[in-house]
Amino acid sequence: MNTTTNYDKTAPESGGGAAPSTLPPNFFRLDLILRLFVFASTVSALVVLVTSKDTETIATGFPPPFASVTRDAKFNYSPAVIYLLVALAVAILYSIITIIGSCSLASRPAPSTKILFNLIVFDTLMAGILASATGSVGSVAYLGLRGNTHTNWNKVCNVFGKFCKHIGSSTVVTLAATIGLILLVVLSSYSLYRRSR
């Protein structure tokens, strides 16, 4: 608060004009929109992920009564999917905290450089966590879709189609949230650059 007040007092002397024209632009309204997008994306991805359950009857090729067997596919059967679940939960909590902060900063004429720097650090960290979770689940999803003939891993998405669609959709939406966080890093970096000029 004190740094902003001092800046306002010295701005007219150096610029010779009105104080608002010399203040660096405040992009926290755009910041708030992006953070709401990240929040909506992560919540959607989490809901789709936890509802990814499929039960199918698979033919075994044996005579009755062993001609078929019932198998389940759930999100908690894969460590990579559990990792994505935890990453999304952390991202949702982080989004709520930063949305509240962004709302309070949107009305300020010039947020401090310390706040901008902290946002760059934590947004980058959160983007890295989501990106790594997306990559790990993406590799598992690809194996489920295509299989691997070299290791004799059979594809399963031809059997558990609903489950694979949920996992794939959640992965794509998480990727969109990651891109949103990267845009937030770029926005905060630009704001910090404008403050340093």
Image (cartoon, rainbow, N blue to C red):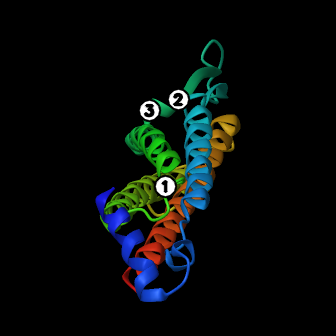
Q: Separation of disc 3 and disc 1 at Cα? A: 17 Å
Q: Are marks 3 and 1 in contact (CB under 8 Å)?
A: no
For label 3, count other residues whose C-alpha is less than 10 Å away and answer few (under 14), some (14-19) or many (20+).
few
Q: Amino acid at mark 3?
A: Tyr
> Residue 79 in the image: x percent, y percent?
37, 40
196 sits to left or right of 169: left
Q: Residue at x 36, y 63 (%)?
A: 5
Q: Secondary structure at mark 3?
A: helix
Q: Amino acid at mark 1?
A: Thr
Q: Secondary structure at mark 2?
A: strand
Please report whichever mark, 2 or 1, sits nearer to the chain's N-terminal start: 2
Q: Are marks 2 and 3 in contact (CB under 8 Å)?
A: yes
For label 1, count other residues whose C-alpha is less than 10 Å away and answer few (under 14), some (14-19) or many (20+).
many
Q: Given this view, does label 3 or label 1 mark the residue nearer the observer?
A: 1
Q: Residue at x 57, y 77 (%)?
A: 21
Q: Which residue is mark 3?
A: 77
Q: Separation of disc 2 and disc 1 at Cα? A: 18 Å
Q: Residue furthest top?
A: 65
Q: Secondary structure at mark 1?
A: helix
73 sits to left or right of 61: left
Res. 159 image quadrant: top right
Q: Which residue is mark 1?
A: 134
Looking at the figure, which quarter contains the C terminus?
A: bottom left
Q: Separation of disc 2 and disc 3 at Cα? A: 6 Å
Res. 28 image quadrant: bottom right
Q: Amino acid at mark 2?
A: Lys
Q: Nearer the viewer, residue 4 or 105?
A: 4
> Residue 187 in the image: x percent, y percent?
51, 70
The numbered dot on residue 187 is none
The numbered dot on residue 74 is 2
Residue 156 in sight: no
